[in-house]
Image (tube, grey):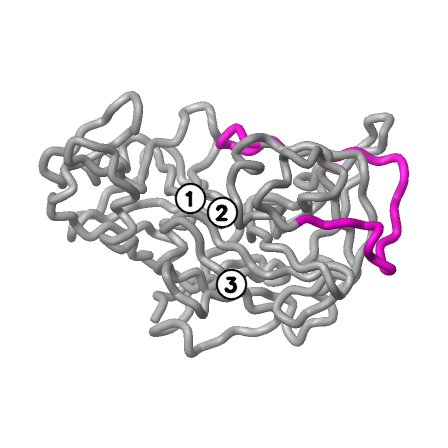
């Protein structure tokens, strides 16, 4: 896998129809496999590889469907062409439905190195966006749902260490060379999302109970960690000079000493590394924190790549659990 933009996103080489290879973002928070395509205006394709169904002998169009995604960062993508195609990720190939973009927002078109998204949400039914043209819901299975029964184990694992050329998605097995200690289970509490309960956080040696809510989605398609206000406040009160701003949320002097910070998942306190707590510089000697406040209107917290940067995670829908251990 290729790592882009610090704690920004992970993309993987994905091959369509045996010959068209694109850089596709791996997203456990959605369930559509969509690609930049030749159906888009040429201005949107600059700097991108894109899929052309006319160059594939294994693409079979499915007529009468539409699809479209609107993400939390206000980016979007949509189209009215889908079809089955042979898709290969990391040597694993399966015939699955892909969605060909007609249009994407500027945040996608202006950013090279990301040519689509592979949604690996827990369950397509309820999360995939495909509809019949008349509006009737017609969810299509994810890549993982299509291969899971043929794997040695119906699981996959993520190893998303920043800066690592060996970042990987492991389908069907657990690689014990990539983590320290033992894997610890966190029960899933949702039938659609990879959602668990996180009942407390730890700043230094002090444990704080989560008083607003405990549900948290593990989402590799989100960059930061979004928690309830009390959790963020406890963290930033321990950082000299930290302050909340209207433009960048929580920020702190870049030369500040940062405390250890952990989030409870199941019975396991997952460490968020101090390197991951510092997301980016925002000027005047200040840095934006990677832990930010979740909107009060949302029903759950989101643990994104800043969380996964230190965790090996096994996703096991059959046994209704996620498993975590500290990355090596």
Q: Which mark is residue 1?
A: 3
Residue beneath disc 2: 219
Q: Are marks 3 and 1 in contact (CB under 8 Å)?
A: no
Decide which of tag 3 and tag 1 comes sooner along the chain.
3
Q: Residues within 10 Å of mark 2 (few under 14, many from 20)?
A: many
Q: Left or right: where does residue 150 sit relative to residue 251?
A: right
Judge whether residue 178 can be spotted in this image: yes
Decide which of tag 3 and tag 2 comes sooner along the chain.
3
Seen in the picture, residue 173 relative to 100 is either above or below; the reply is below
Q: Residues within 10 Å of mark 3 (few under 14, many from 20)?
A: many
Question: Mark 1: which secondary structure?
Answer: loop
Residue displayed at 63% across by 35% down: 44
**Mark 2 against mark 1, which lies toward the viewer?**
1
Between the C-alphas of marks 3 and 1, the distance is 17 Å
- The stretch of residues the image draws in magenta is 50-75
Q: Residues within 10 Å of mark 1 (few under 14, many from 20)?
A: many
Q: Left or right: where does residue 108 sit relative to residue 285?
A: right
Judge whether residue 168 is colored magenta: no
């Amino acid at each position: 896998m290729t790592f882009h933009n610090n704690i920004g996103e992970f993309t993987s080489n994905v091959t369509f129809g045996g010959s068209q290879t694109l850089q596709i973002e791996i997203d456990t928070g959605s369930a559509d496999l969509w690609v930049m395509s030749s159906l888009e205006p040429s201005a949107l394709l600059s700097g991108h590889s894109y899929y052309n169904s006319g160059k594939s002998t294994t693409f079979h169009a499915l007529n009468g469907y539409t699809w479209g995604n609107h993400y939390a960062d206000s980016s979007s993508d949509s189209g009215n062409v889908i079809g089955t195609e042979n898709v290969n990720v990391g040597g694993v190939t399966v015939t699955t439905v892909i969605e060909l973009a007609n249009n994407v927002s500027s945040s996608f078109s202006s950013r090279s190195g990301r040519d689509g998204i592979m949604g690996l949400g827990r369950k397509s039914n309820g999360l995939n966006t495909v509809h019949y043209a008349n509006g009737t819901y017609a969810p299509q299975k994810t890549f993982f749902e299509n291969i899971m029964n043929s794997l040695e184990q119906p699981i996959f694992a993520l190893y998303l260490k920043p800066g690592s050329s060996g970042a990987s998605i492991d389908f069907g097995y657990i690689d014990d060379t990539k983590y320290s200690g033992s894997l610890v289970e966190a029960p899933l509490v949702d039938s659609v999302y990879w959602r668990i309960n996180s009942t407390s956080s730890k700043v230094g040696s002090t444990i704080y109970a989560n008083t607003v809510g405990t549900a948290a989605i593990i989402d590799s398609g989100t960059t930061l960690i979004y928690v309830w206000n009390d959790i963020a406040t406890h963290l930033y009160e321990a950082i000299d000079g930290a302050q909340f701003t209207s433009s960048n949320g929580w920020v702190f002097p870049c030369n500040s000493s940062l405390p250890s910070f952990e989030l409870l998942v199941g019975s396991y306190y997952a460490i968020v590394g101090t390197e991951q707590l510092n997301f980016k510089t925002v000027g005047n000697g200040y840095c934006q924190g990677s832990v930010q406040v979740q909107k009060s209107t949302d029903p759950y917290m989101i643990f994104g790549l800043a969380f996964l940067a230190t965790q090996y995670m096994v996703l096991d829908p059959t046994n209704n659990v996620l498993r975590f251990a500290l990355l090596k």
